[in-house]
Image (tube, grey):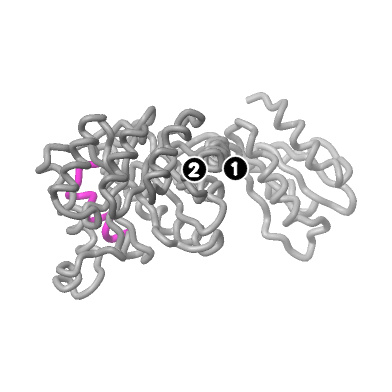
Amino acid sequence: MYRDQTKEIQIGNVKIGGGNPIAIQSMTNTKTEDAAATTEQILRLEAAGCEIIRCAVPTMEAAEALREIKKNIHIPLVADIHFDYRLAIAAIQNGADKIRINPGNIGSREKVQAVVDKAKEYGVPIRVGVNSGSLEKHLLEKYGGVTAEGIVESALDKVRMIEEMGYDNLVVSIKSSDVLMCVEAHELIAKQCHYPLHVGITESGTVYSGNIKSSVGLGIILHEGIGNTIRVSLTGDPVEEIRTAKLVLKTLGLRKGGIEVVSCPTCGRTKIDLISLANEVEKMVSDIPLDIKVAVMGCVVNGPGEAKEADIGIAGGIGEGLLIKKGQIVKKVKEEELLSTLRQELLNWKQ
């Protein structure tokens, strides 16, 4: 597998590459200069399961705020830098565990060298990031527009530049909002690059469309054995990115733990508000550390049979519902007690 053969890179207290588990990332959408608000959001993301967090550093004030933010969080912090090499240097000096740059927009080779030298001094990894929207003019002309080959060539050019500067503590990311182009680019670069790959579908959209595009793209790439850390990019609360990333990894068998909720699609036999109930169950189980399957069924006719592959489940009737274990009815309870009964059973679960 490609991911097991990549170089191991240490980012704060998290290792990626070299067969380490795929790490889940997100990015704050607060003003980094507001250390309190940024810290609060990172702590919420930590609670949701985020393992590496990235913050935009567009100003020197933001770079300096990293020092305060770092005091109160428990996961590695990545500084995202564009255009000004001095911000990258300041971010490293203020405690960033990794920096993300596109050497193509940092400026002259001397400026890139200054960033590399500072990263080397502090032992901070550099994520070399290339997006399809920032492809150089000569590559657009060479390939007749934005192509997977052009994205890969651009990224590897940047990697070679930094290697020539005497540094190989690198993570590589190549992103496109075109899902299939992104897949093709990762298939190409995985054969040529031994550094860990940060995988994501950039600018994927809202929680609805972004989840679909990210799940399709990440699902294909990860299933092919490519990728060492992932970020689901959504226009919305970044906590949603973590929820999706965890479910993608679990669905692909790349991560264990956490309760999986399955529910029927509803039909004319449904006698309860199954949609609300299923959503309530999904939220309710998020803080219960079990590795089991919970079924939420809409009727007592087929509910027990359909839920037999789950460890435990509930099925609704008219004003009442059933608690089911492995397809067997355990007891009947009032509809308004279904959720609390299920939670109690889970809290007292014995494997």
Q: Residue at x 41, y 34 (%)?
A: 76
Q: Residue at x 37, y 43 (%)?
A: 79
Mark 1 and mark 2 in contact? Answer it, CB < 8 Å. yes
Mark with earlier residue (1, 2):
2
Near-viewer residue (20 or 342): 20
Q: Which mark is residue 300?
A: none
Rendered location of residue 265, percent (x, y): 67, 59
Determine if the magenta segment contains residue 188: yes
- Quarter in which the N terminus is drawn: top left
Count of numbered badges drawn on the protein: 2
Name the residue that disc number 2 marks: 250
Q: Is residue 172 above or below residue 73?
A: below
Residue type beneath disc 1: Glu
Rendered location of residue 27, percent (x, y): 45, 47
Residue type beneath disc 2: Lys
What secondary structure is marked by label 2? helix
Name the residue that disc number 1 marks: 260
> What are the residue bounds of the magenta stretch?
183-196
Answer few, some or many: residues within 10 Å of disc 2's Cα (few below 14, many 20 plus, some between 14 and 19): some
Rendered location of residue 277, percent (x, y): 75, 50
Q: Is residue 78 in view from this perspective?
A: yes
Mark pair 1, 2: CA separation = 9 Å
Answer few, some or many: residues within 10 Å of disc 1's Cα (few below 14, many 20 plus, some between 14 and 19): some
Near-viewer residue (217 or 144): 144
What secondary structure is marked by label 1? strand
